Image: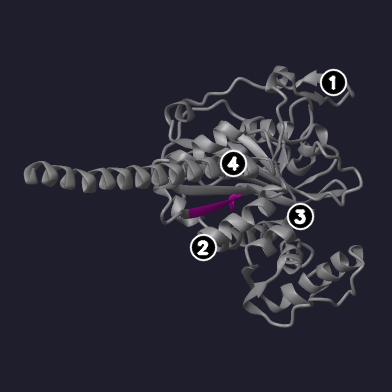
Amino acid sequence: MRNKAGNQGSAKPKKKIGKILLTIGAIILGLIVGVVGFLIWYKYYLFNHITFVTTPSAEVTVLDEEGNAVNLDSLRPTTVHEIIDSADDIHNFLLIGIDSRNRNYNESGTGGLSDVTMVMSVNTTTGTIRMISIARDCYVHVPGYSYAMKINAAMSRGGPDVLCATVEDTLRINIDGWAYVNFYHMAEIIDAVGGVYCDVSSSELNSEGGLNWNLAEVNNLMGLPASQDAVTQTGYIWLNGRQAVAYARIRKIDSDYKRSERQVEVLRSLMDQFISLSPVGQAAALPEILSAVTTNISANDIENYAIHFLPNAGNVSIEYMQLPIEGCFNSGMFGDEWSIRPNWNAMIPYVHTFFYGETTEFDPVPDISSSPSLDSCPSDLSIDELLR
């Protein structure tokens, strides 16, 4: 009897332990399901803040110089992209900055000029980002037009698809998608990450057309006192959103070339500030950032790029090069317009080498009038010399 009672006594604790383990397992499973469910919800919550453009590329049209709506693909030249085809881990994206204060602007991105034109090349294997900015006064050939024009005008001829096609044809690279950000919202994005740090000189701060001059203009448009948030210090200083946008818009005091450098400086600091935030801080900032983005990159592609890139992005390396390259362009008054006249064929090998580590044969880009000859352009510069 004692043995039987003893066996029954030892069975009860085992049953209790079994129930406890089942309960713990159920709790853990519930937590996992809850976390996964939250992550899935949060992913769609974030994607709902982005404006996605779903028009197939084959249906995109451009107004040609005669005012006719023409299929964009039918206007594209045949180009050689051997390097791009073999580089499955390298993805190029066009980043565009626009300003909705332009009276011709509309929600599709057409009608206004592009203030910023950059190509961001992401290497998902190495976790590196390489960026090229193109000065807005550079002359290029836009599909549908027999004459060249400033690259910032391409956006007004048919929106981001036309600008994207223009950049592809000009640099002889493939671009996987575009995204544009409205500068009207850039101040809010910068404030969402806690501001940015920029190196502000005395002339950039106080000159007509400088930071405080631009800030007063923005303040007036917003119904604020002209002197509100005026910057009083120079050097490497913290700027809030409106101050940083005013800094990025400085152009009159020097050149479009320097303006591009300031824009990249703001963008670089914005990325650094976001990366330095805690996961909670990043989660809080993302909705504000994504709400200002319009893109033709699908949600699935964004997710795939992130999955492949993030594991190698522990210490993100960002390298930057600016176009045009010194010695490869002429600038000044041509007719009644100031513009930059680059020799794109001289710069394409540098772009290829910067993004892919090598160059290849390509169909030459039609010459831009008043640009330097190919023979007069430097062909032996190292990429390190070109990094800014």
Sequence-first tag of 2 and 1 = 1
Is residue 106 covered in magenta?
Answer: no
Sequence-first tag of 3 and 2 = 3
Question: In 3D space, how far apart are the residues under numbered discs 3 and 1 (Cα atoms)?
Answer: 31 Å
Q: Name the residue under label 2.
A: 278
Q: Is residue 348 visible?
A: no
Question: In 3D space, how far apart are the residues under numbered discs 3 and 2 (Cα atoms)?
Answer: 23 Å
Q: Nearer the viewer, residue 256 or 268?
A: 268
Residue 350 spot, x, y in % from top left: 50, 43
Question: In 3D space, how far apart are the residues under numbered discs 4 and 1 (Cα atoms)?
Answer: 41 Å
Q: Mark 4 Cα within 10 Å, few/some/many (few <14, many 20+)?
A: few
Q: Which residue is drawn at 79% across and 77% down?
A: 230
Question: In 3D space, how far apart are the residues under numbered discs 2 and 4 (Cα atoms)?
Answer: 20 Å
Sequence-first tag of 4 and 3 = 4
Residue 276 spot, x, y in % from top left: 51, 63
Q: Mark 3 points at which residue?
A: 185
Which amino acid type is shown beneath numbered disc 4?
Answer: Trp
Q: Name the residue under label 4.
A: 41
Sequence-first tag of 3 and 1 = 1
**Residue stretch in magenta:** 318-327
Q: Report the quarter where the N terminus lies.
A: top left
Q: Residue 69 carries which label?
A: 1
Q: Which residue is drawn at 73% across and 56% down?
A: 186
Q: Mark 1 Cα within 10 Å, few/some/many (few <14, many 20+)?
A: some
Question: In 3D space, how far apart are the residues under numbered discs 2 and 1 (Cα atoms)?
Answer: 49 Å
